Every structure is written in structure tokens, then in C-alpha cells.
């Protein structure tokens, strides 16, 4: 599910469209993200935010019930076919991936290849591996209060040129997903998942990589 067409012009940060694709479950971090987005929107009343959520799950009613200021609109799309998801990758400004635990996170790959910058949780191996130094987006720790707000502040404070370059930068980041790199990253993700579940002993290297993945600066 990748948008391969011409990249739309992104230049208006007073009207942000965020996209989240995934199951509406506790593991996906949707409620903490909703709370943080509401706080940031309240503190930035001049910015209109449309949060498009593709997917369904047990927390759908809870997510819809979360209080929101008037400048934060939640649009629930439910389950969507691949064409609709591709259209969402084209039409939004950023992918928000707030997961609390993901061995990889395929939507991060799809978004980057579609030219959609990503605000990705450091608990996603895809975000932690592919995104760095604002190339392709940002990583943040969803368990750290204010971390998502700090990323959104950084987004708003980017130079206009840097902001307009982000879709093209996202596609350049996706080029790193060569077959050889993908194979290495798959092995790393499987090893990480098996270690987290106690199926492999935790080595010093694994422990440090688990720690460092959530020590990325959001500034």
C-alpha cells in the first residue's frame, strides 16, 4: 500500500492533517497520543489539526470519548481497503505512529515510501531504524510526558524550506530499505522480539539497543 505518484505541495502548517493506521488497542498507544494531541492543540489554538484514524479495535469508543479542543478534529475511517489507505498516505501531512510495542511497524515503511513524513514511537523498530536527524520525520518516546508536544513544536519551528523538503526526504530515507538492509533489519527485529518475550537471553548489545531506541532526542 504505497503512493507512487507526484508528491503534493506541503506548505501550510496552520492546518495539519495527521494520519494513524492500525488497530485501536492499548498496545498501539492511541489514548496517550490523543491526550497529548489535545494538550498541544489547546496550547496552539491558531493551528487546526485533523487526525485521520484508519482502523478499528476495542478502544474505539474510548478514543472518541476523549475530550478535545475545537481545533482538534478526530475523523474515524474504520477499516479501509488498500486504495483508500494509499489515498490517505497522499493526502495527509504526517503519519503519527504512537505504538507502545512493535517489532517493526510496516506502516512506517509504507508512509516513507509514499513521501509521508513520520512521527514514530521509539518502540517501533522501523521508526528507530529508519528515521534520524529529522530525515523522514521524528522519533519520540510515547511514555515520556510532553515528548510528542516537543516534536510538534519542532515541526512548527522548522524553516519553510525544510518543511517543504520533508516528503522528498521521506522517500530518500525509504531507499535505505534495500533487500540486504531489509534482511539484516528483519533478523534484528526477530531477535529483539524473541529477547523481549524471554525466548532468547538478553545480551549486553541487545540491552543497550533497547535502551538507546528510546533515548532519541525529539528536538
Image (spheres, rainbow, N blue to C red):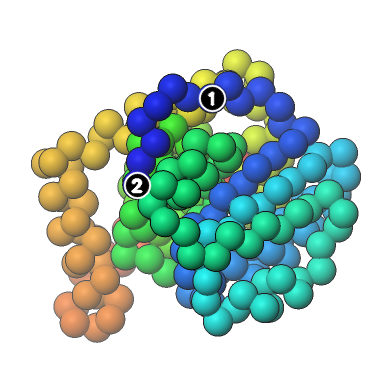
Which numbered disc flags the more N-terminal residue, 1 or 2?
A: 2
Percent position of residue 11, x then y: 66, 23
Seen from this angle, which residue lies furthest top?
161
Percent position of residue 132, x then y: 42, 38
Which of the pair 148/69 is nearer the observer?
69
Question: Residue at the spot x=13%, y=50% of the render?
Answer: 183
Any mark on residue 1, and which?
2
Question: Residue at the spot x=72%, y=65% of the render?
Answer: 35
The image quarter in which residue 37 lies: bottom right
Instruction: Say few, some or many: other residues with alpha carbon within 10 Å of mark 2 (under 14 / 14 to 19 / 20 or more).
Output: some
Any mark on residue 8, and which?
1
Question: Residue at the spot x=72%, y=31% of the render?
Answer: 13
Which of the pair 129/72 is nearer the observer?
72
Q: Tell me if residue 59 comes above or below residue 69 in the rendering.
A: below
- State left or right for residue 148 relative to residue 45: left
Percent position of residue 169, x then y: 43, 26
Amino acid at each position: 500500500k504505497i503512493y507512487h505518484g507526484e508528491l503534493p505541495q506541503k506548505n501550510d502548517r496552520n492546518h495539519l492533517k495527521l494520519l494513524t493506521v492500525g488497530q485501536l488497542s492499548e498496545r498501539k498507544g492511541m489514548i496517550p497520543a490523543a491526550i497529548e494531541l489535545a494538550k498541544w492543540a489547546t496550547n496552539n489554538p491558531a493551528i487546526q489539526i485533523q487526525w485521520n484514524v484508519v482502523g478499528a479495535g476495542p478502544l474505539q469508543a474510548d478514543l472518541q470519548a476523549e475530550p478535545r479542543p475545537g481545533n482538534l478534529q478526530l475523523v474515524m475511517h474504520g477499516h479501509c481497503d488498500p486504495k483508500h489507505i494509499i489515498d490517505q498516505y497522499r493526502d495527509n501531512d504526517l503519519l503519527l505512529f504512537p505504538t507502545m510495542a512493535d517489532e517493526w511497524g510496516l506502516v512506517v515503511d509504507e508512509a516513507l515510501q509514499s513521501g509521508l513524513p513520520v512521527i514514530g514511537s521509539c518502540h517501533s523498530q522501523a521508526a528507530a531504524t529508519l528515521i534520524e536527524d529529522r530525515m523522514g520525520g521524528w522519533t519520540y518516546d510515547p511514555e515520556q510526558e510532553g515528548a510528542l508536544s516537543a516534536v510538534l513544536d519542532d515541526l512548527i519551528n522548522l524553516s519553510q524550506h525544510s518543511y517543504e523538503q520533508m516528503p522528498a526526504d521521506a522517500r530518500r530515507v525509504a531507499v535505505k530499505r534495500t533487500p540486504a538492509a531489509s534482511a539484516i533489519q528483519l533478523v534484528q527485529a526477530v531477535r529483539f522480539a524473541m529477547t523481549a518475550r524471554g525466548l532468547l537471553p538478553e545480551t549486553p548489545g541487545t540491552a543497550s539497543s533497547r535502551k538507546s531506541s528510546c533515548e532519541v532526542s525529539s528536538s
